[in-house]
Amino acid sequence: MSWAATVLTVLPEMFPGPLGISLCGKALAEERWSLETVDIRKFATTRYGSVDDTPAGGGPGMVMRPDILGAAIDTVARDDRPLILMSPRGQRLTQARARELSQGPGAVLVCGRFEGVDERLIEARGLQEISIGDYVLSGGEIAAITLIDAVVRLLPGVLGAEASLEEESFEQDLLEYPQYTRPQTWEGREIPAVLASGHHKRIAEWRRAQSIEITKSRRPDLWDAHQRRAAGAATKQ
Ligand code: SAH
Protein backbone atom coordinates (compact mmCIF):
# COMPACT_ATOMS: atom_id res chain seq x y z
CA MET A 1 0.00 0.00 0.00
CA SER A 2 1.37 3.39 -0.92
CA TRP A 3 1.25 6.45 1.33
CA ALA A 4 -2.30 7.83 1.05
CA ALA A 5 -3.21 11.51 1.40
CA THR A 6 -6.84 12.63 1.61
CA VAL A 7 -7.40 16.39 1.59
CA LEU A 8 -10.69 17.99 2.63
CA THR A 9 -11.03 21.43 1.08
CA VAL A 10 -13.46 23.93 -0.40
CA LEU A 11 -10.91 24.44 -3.21
CA PRO A 12 -10.22 20.96 -4.64
CA GLU A 13 -9.02 22.64 -7.86
CA MET A 14 -5.85 23.63 -5.95
CA PHE A 15 -4.79 19.93 -6.05
CA PRO A 16 -2.56 18.30 -7.09
CA GLY A 17 -1.21 21.72 -8.17
CA PRO A 18 2.52 21.79 -7.43
CA LEU A 19 2.29 18.21 -6.10
CA GLY A 20 1.56 17.02 -9.66
CA ILE A 21 4.94 18.09 -11.07
CA SER A 22 8.63 17.37 -10.56
CA LEU A 23 9.65 14.97 -7.78
CA CYS A 24 6.23 14.63 -6.11
CA GLY A 25 4.40 14.39 -9.44
CA LYS A 26 6.70 11.65 -10.67
CA ALA A 27 6.22 9.74 -7.42
CA LEU A 28 2.45 10.22 -7.75
CA ALA A 29 2.53 8.80 -11.30
CA GLU A 30 4.62 5.88 -10.03
CA GLU A 31 1.98 5.27 -7.33
CA ARG A 32 4.46 5.70 -4.50
CA TRP A 33 1.75 7.83 -2.91
CA SER A 34 -1.89 8.64 -3.71
CA LEU A 35 -3.98 11.78 -3.46
CA GLU A 36 -7.73 12.08 -3.00
CA THR A 37 -9.61 15.34 -2.46
CA VAL A 38 -12.97 15.69 -0.76
CA ASP A 39 -14.94 18.81 -1.73
CA ILE A 40 -16.43 20.11 1.52
CA ARG A 41 -19.01 22.15 -0.43
CA LYS A 42 -20.69 18.93 -1.57
CA PHE A 43 -21.87 18.51 2.02
CA ALA A 44 -23.51 21.94 2.25
CA THR A 45 -27.15 21.84 3.23
CA THR A 46 -28.29 25.22 1.89
CA ARG A 47 -29.19 26.04 -1.66
CA TYR A 48 -26.21 28.38 -1.95
CA GLY A 49 -23.70 25.75 -0.90
CA SER A 50 -22.33 27.80 1.98
CA VAL A 51 -20.13 25.94 4.45
CA ASP A 52 -19.55 28.83 6.88
CA ASP A 53 -21.54 31.15 9.11
CA THR A 54 -20.97 34.21 11.29
CA PRO A 55 -18.97 33.76 14.52
CA ALA A 56 -20.93 33.18 17.71
CA GLY A 57 -20.33 36.16 20.01
CA GLY A 58 -19.76 38.47 17.07
CA GLY A 59 -16.57 39.67 15.42
CA PRO A 60 -15.21 39.72 11.90
CA GLY A 61 -15.14 36.95 9.32
CA MET A 62 -16.85 33.62 8.99
CA VAL A 63 -16.40 30.25 10.69
CA MET A 64 -16.69 26.82 9.06
CA ARG A 65 -19.73 24.94 10.34
CA PRO A 66 -19.14 21.75 12.35
CA ASP A 67 -22.11 19.85 10.90
CA ILE A 68 -20.98 20.29 7.28
CA LEU A 69 -17.28 19.69 7.91
CA GLY A 70 -18.16 16.78 10.22
CA ALA A 71 -20.28 15.14 7.51
CA ALA A 72 -17.40 15.50 5.03
CA ILE A 73 -14.90 13.96 7.49
CA ASP A 74 -17.25 11.08 8.26
CA THR A 75 -17.25 9.92 4.63
CA VAL A 76 -13.47 9.41 4.62
CA ALA A 77 -12.09 5.92 5.19
CA ARG A 78 -9.50 6.76 7.84
CA ASP A 79 -7.68 3.40 7.89
CA ASP A 80 -5.49 4.30 10.90
CA ARG A 81 -4.36 7.51 9.27
CA PRO A 82 -3.98 10.57 11.52
CA LEU A 83 -6.72 13.18 11.14
CA ILE A 84 -5.00 16.57 10.92
CA LEU A 85 -6.29 20.14 10.79
CA MET A 86 -3.93 22.63 9.16
CA SER A 87 -3.95 25.48 11.69
CA PRO A 88 -1.70 28.35 12.81
CA ARG A 89 -2.48 27.27 16.40
CA GLY A 90 -1.12 23.77 15.81
CA GLN A 91 2.15 22.07 16.67
CA ARG A 92 4.87 23.28 14.36
CA LEU A 93 5.64 21.00 11.41
CA THR A 94 9.23 19.76 11.72
CA GLN A 95 11.43 17.40 9.74
CA ALA A 96 10.99 14.85 12.55
CA ARG A 97 7.19 15.08 12.24
CA ALA A 98 7.39 14.77 8.45
CA ARG A 99 9.56 11.66 8.85
CA GLU A 100 7.16 10.17 11.40
CA LEU A 101 4.23 10.77 9.03
CA SER A 102 6.19 9.25 6.12
CA GLN A 103 6.58 6.04 8.12
CA GLY A 104 2.81 5.73 8.65
CA PRO A 105 0.00 4.81 6.24
CA GLY A 106 -0.79 8.40 5.16
CA ALA A 107 -2.76 11.38 6.46
CA VAL A 108 -6.21 12.94 6.29
CA LEU A 109 -5.74 16.71 6.08
CA VAL A 110 -8.49 19.24 6.73
CA CYS A 111 -7.95 22.69 5.22
CA GLY A 112 -9.57 25.61 7.01
CA ARG A 113 -10.71 28.79 5.26
CA PHE A 114 -12.14 32.08 6.50
CA GLU A 115 -11.50 32.60 10.25
CA GLY A 116 -11.13 28.89 10.93
CA VAL A 117 -13.38 26.04 12.05
CA ASP A 118 -15.89 25.55 14.88
CA GLU A 119 -13.99 24.34 17.98
CA ARG A 120 -16.55 21.61 18.72
CA LEU A 121 -15.62 19.82 15.52
CA ILE A 122 -11.93 19.77 16.54
CA GLU A 123 -12.89 18.23 19.89
CA ALA A 124 -15.55 15.82 18.65
CA ARG A 125 -13.45 14.33 15.85
CA GLY A 126 -10.14 14.57 17.74
CA LEU A 127 -8.32 16.61 15.09
CA GLN A 128 -4.58 17.08 15.61
CA GLU A 129 -3.60 20.62 14.66
CA ILE A 130 -0.41 21.22 12.66
CA SER A 131 1.02 24.62 11.72
CA ILE A 132 3.63 25.20 9.02
CA GLY A 133 4.97 28.32 10.74
CA ASP A 134 4.18 31.45 12.70
CA TYR A 135 2.32 33.40 10.04
CA VAL A 136 -1.28 33.34 8.87
CA LEU A 137 -2.23 32.00 5.43
CA SER A 138 -5.60 32.60 3.81
CA GLY A 139 -6.36 28.88 3.86
CA GLY A 140 -5.01 25.47 4.80
CA GLU A 141 -4.43 24.28 1.22
CA ILE A 142 -0.91 25.65 0.79
CA ALA A 143 -0.08 24.34 4.27
CA ALA A 144 -1.36 20.87 3.30
CA ILE A 145 0.65 20.99 0.05
CA THR A 146 3.74 21.93 2.08
CA LEU A 147 3.23 19.05 4.52
CA ILE A 148 2.63 16.51 1.75
CA ASP A 149 5.71 17.70 -0.19
CA ALA A 150 7.91 17.37 2.91
CA VAL A 151 6.59 13.83 3.52
CA VAL A 152 6.62 12.53 -0.06
CA ARG A 153 10.31 13.24 -0.66
CA LEU A 154 11.06 11.01 2.36
CA LEU A 155 9.14 8.01 0.97
CA PRO A 156 11.31 5.09 -0.15
CA GLY A 157 12.50 5.40 -3.74
CA VAL A 158 11.35 9.00 -4.26
CA LEU A 159 14.78 10.63 -4.01
CA GLY A 160 17.51 8.92 -5.99
CA ALA A 161 20.20 8.65 -3.35
CA GLU A 162 18.94 7.72 0.12
CA ALA A 163 22.22 9.04 1.51
CA SER A 164 21.39 12.56 0.41
CA LEU A 165 18.62 12.58 3.01
CA GLU A 166 20.84 11.71 5.95
CA GLU A 167 22.99 14.82 5.72
CA GLU A 168 20.21 17.27 5.05
CA SER A 169 19.25 20.25 7.14
CA PHE A 170 17.46 19.36 10.41
CA GLU A 171 18.73 15.79 10.51
CA GLN A 172 20.44 15.62 13.92
CA ASP A 173 19.25 19.21 14.49
CA LEU A 174 21.95 20.69 12.26
CA LEU A 175 21.71 22.86 9.15
CA GLU A 176 23.40 21.63 6.02
CA TYR A 177 26.97 22.57 5.02
CA PRO A 178 27.47 24.83 1.95
CA GLN A 179 27.24 23.18 -1.47
CA TYR A 180 29.30 24.02 -4.60
CA THR A 181 29.40 22.90 -8.21
CA ARG A 182 31.15 23.87 -11.45
CA PRO A 183 32.62 26.18 -12.63
CA GLN A 184 35.69 25.87 -10.40
CA THR A 185 36.16 29.66 -10.50
CA TRP A 186 33.16 31.98 -10.72
CA GLU A 187 33.47 35.79 -10.56
CA GLY A 188 36.87 35.29 -8.96
CA ARG A 189 35.50 32.96 -6.25
CA GLU A 190 36.99 29.49 -5.87
CA ILE A 191 35.37 26.32 -4.58
CA PRO A 192 37.02 25.57 -1.18
CA ALA A 193 40.21 23.59 -1.92
CA VAL A 194 39.41 20.76 0.48
CA LEU A 195 36.47 19.71 -1.72
CA ALA A 196 38.83 19.06 -4.65
CA SER A 197 41.30 17.11 -2.46
CA GLY A 198 39.57 13.76 -2.97
CA HIS A 199 40.30 13.11 0.71
CA HIS A 200 36.97 11.76 1.94
CA LYS A 201 37.69 11.94 5.65
CA ARG A 202 38.92 15.54 5.45
CA ILE A 203 35.91 16.52 3.33
CA ALA A 204 33.54 14.96 5.86
CA GLU A 205 35.28 16.78 8.73
CA TRP A 206 35.17 20.10 6.87
CA ARG A 207 31.47 19.68 6.09
CA ARG A 208 30.65 18.79 9.68
CA ALA A 209 32.58 21.82 10.98
CA GLN A 210 30.74 24.09 8.50
CA SER A 211 27.40 22.57 9.53
CA ILE A 212 28.14 23.31 13.17
CA GLU A 213 29.29 26.89 12.47
CA ILE A 214 26.24 27.70 10.36
CA THR A 215 23.84 26.16 12.90
CA LYS A 216 25.46 27.99 15.84
CA SER A 217 25.34 31.37 14.17
CA ARG A 218 21.95 31.15 12.44
CA ARG A 219 19.90 28.92 14.70
CA PRO A 220 21.06 28.87 18.32
CA ASP A 221 17.80 27.08 19.20
CA LEU A 222 18.68 24.17 16.88
CA TRP A 223 22.25 24.10 18.18
CA ASP A 224 20.91 23.73 21.75
CA ALA A 225 18.67 20.87 20.59
CA HIS A 226 21.64 19.23 18.86
CA GLN A 227 23.73 19.41 22.04
CA ARG A 228 20.89 18.02 24.15
CA ARG A 229 20.52 15.16 21.67
CA ALA A 230 24.26 14.46 21.78
CA ALA A 231 24.21 14.50 25.62
CA GLY A 232 21.18 12.17 25.63
CA ALA A 233 22.91 9.73 23.28
CA ALA A 234 26.02 9.78 25.50
CA THR A 235 24.10 8.95 28.71
CA LYS A 236 22.24 6.09 27.00
CA GLN A 237 25.48 4.26 26.24
N1 SAH B 1 -8.32 33.25 12.52
C1 SAH B 1 -7.34 32.20 12.52
C2 SAH B 1 -6.61 32.14 11.19
C3 SAH B 1 -7.45 31.59 10.06
S1 SAH B 1 -6.56 31.45 8.59
C4 SAH B 1 -6.33 32.46 13.63
O1 SAH B 1 -6.09 33.62 13.95
O2 SAH B 1 -5.76 31.49 14.16
C5 SAH B 1 -7.59 30.35 7.67
C6 SAH B 1 -7.12 28.91 7.60
O3 SAH B 1 -5.84 28.87 6.98
C7 SAH B 1 -6.93 28.20 8.92
O4 SAH B 1 -8.13 27.63 9.38
C8 SAH B 1 -5.91 27.13 8.57
O5 SAH B 1 -6.54 25.98 8.02
C9 SAH B 1 -5.08 27.79 7.49
N2 SAH B 1 -3.80 28.32 7.98
C10 SAH B 1 -3.46 29.62 8.12
N3 SAH B 1 -2.22 29.76 8.58
C11 SAH B 1 -1.71 28.52 8.73
C12 SAH B 1 -0.46 28.02 9.18
N4 SAH B 1 0.51 28.82 9.58
N5 SAH B 1 -0.29 26.68 9.20
C13 SAH B 1 -1.29 25.85 8.82
N6 SAH B 1 -2.48 26.27 8.39
C14 SAH B 1 -2.71 27.59 8.33
Image (spheres, grey):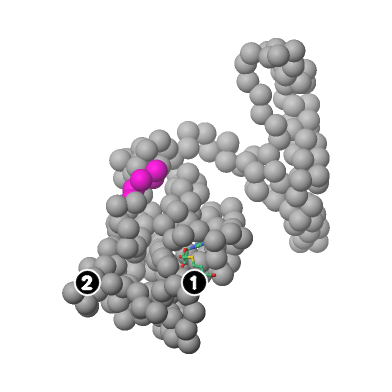
Is residue 233 located in the magenta-colored stretch of the structure?
no
Q: What element carries label 1?
A: strand
Whole-percent x and y of residue 139?
A: 44, 61
Q: Quadrant of the N terminus?
A: bottom left
Please indicate, yes or no, whether residue 1 appears anywhere in the rendered image: no
Asked whether the residues under the numbered discs 1 and 2 touch, taking CB atoms below 8 Å apart as contact, a structural biologist would say: no
Whole-percent x and y of residue 113?
A: 41, 66
Is residue 17 located in the magenta-colored stretch of the structure?
yes
- Tell me what residue is drawn at x 57 percent, y 41 percent: 165
Query: Does residue 109 sit above or below 213 in this rendering?
Result: below
Whole-percent x and y of residue 216?
A: 81, 46
Magenta range: 15-19
User: Is ligand 1 less than 8 Å from the beta carbon at label 2?
Assistant: no
Toward the viewer: 190 or 167?
190
Tell me the quarter of the picture where residue 99 sits. bottom right
Q: Quick check: 108 left or right of 168?
A: left
- Tell me what residue is drawn at x 34 percent, y 68 percent: 79
Q: Residue 48 carries which label?
A: 2
Q: Is the magenta stretch mostly helix, strand or loop?
A: helix
Tell me the quarter of the picture where residue 122 sits. bottom left
Q: Which of marks 1 and 2 is nearer the N terminus?
A: 2
At label 2, which amino acid type do we have? Tyr
Please indicate, yes or no, whether residue 228 appears anywhere in the rendered image: yes
Toward the viewer: 182 or 235?
182
Query: Does residue 209 sit above or below 50 in this rendering?
Result: above
In this view, the mark in front (1 or 2): 2
Toward the viewer: 237 or 98?
98
Q: Is mark 2 on a helix, strand or loop?
A: loop
Please name the residue that numbered disc 1 is placed on.
Answer: 128
**Crowding at mark 1 (Cα within 10 Å: few <14, some 14-19, many 20+):** some
